[in-house]
Image (tube, grey):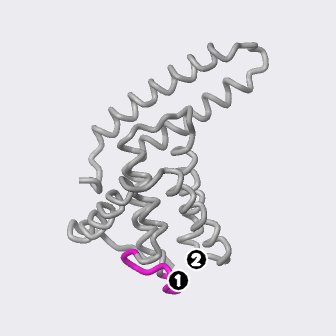
Amino acid sequence: MKIAFELTDRDLNFFRKALQHSREAVRDAEESEIIDAISDVLNEIRKNEPLPDFVGKRIPELESLIRMLTDDEWQLPKGDRERLLATFVYFADPEDILPDDIPVIGYLDDVIIIELVLRELQHVRVAYEEFCEFRENFESDSTKNINSVIRRDRIDRRRQQLHQRMQRRSAAQKNTDLWS
């Protein structure tokens, strides 16, 4: 069964306000505490398996966002870091728009937030995937015996190229503007 619905600007305002509250919380919290909290929530959610598919399908997406945030070589720009941290604060809050303890639908609002964030950060995610592929290919090429300084320089150069591209594409993309 497929259920589809359209979010109006009024609907999106509910999510904007919720994310604004989460963003305010991000300013007062340590990044490591937020990452620990989201990891704990994901572990708790996994204990409740089998999960509704609409929730289970998003777990790998959240894990990918966590990896992108915590990858020191990627150096996610500050604005994108704040967006992800605010998303994680929202997701980890059991008393958000729909309390998480409501069977089956308790995570529906969380899933909507994740989908909206994934769409807004599409170019960031694609750039990060390309960065990881570049780094993996670079490191797996056994014909190279490159010292760590050269490795760092090439990784840095590729990251800078991808950051510039993702910023251009994000600026050109019409998005839902969740963060205004």
Residue 178 horizontal/vertical position (percent):
29, 56
Looking at the magenta stretch, what is its main secondary structure?
loop
Against 56, residue 153 (above or below) is: above
- Dot 1: few (<14), some (14–19), or many (≥20) neighbours within 10 Å? few
The residue sitting at 62% across, 13% down in the picture is: 150
Amino acid under disc 2: Pro
Above-or-below relation of 98 to 89: below
Numbered disc 1: secondary structure: loop
Over which residues does the magenta segment extend?
96-105
Q: Residue furthest left?
A: 10
Q: Residue at x 28, y 63 (%)?
A: 16
In space, the residues marked 2 and 1 are separated at their CA atoms by: 7 Å
Residue 13 is a magenta residue: no
Asked if the residue at tag 1 contacts the one at tag 2, i.e. Cβ–Cβ closer than 8 Å, the answer is yes
Disc 2 secondary structure class: loop
Circle 2 is placed at which residue position?
52
Give the side of residue 44 with respect to residue 13, left or right: right
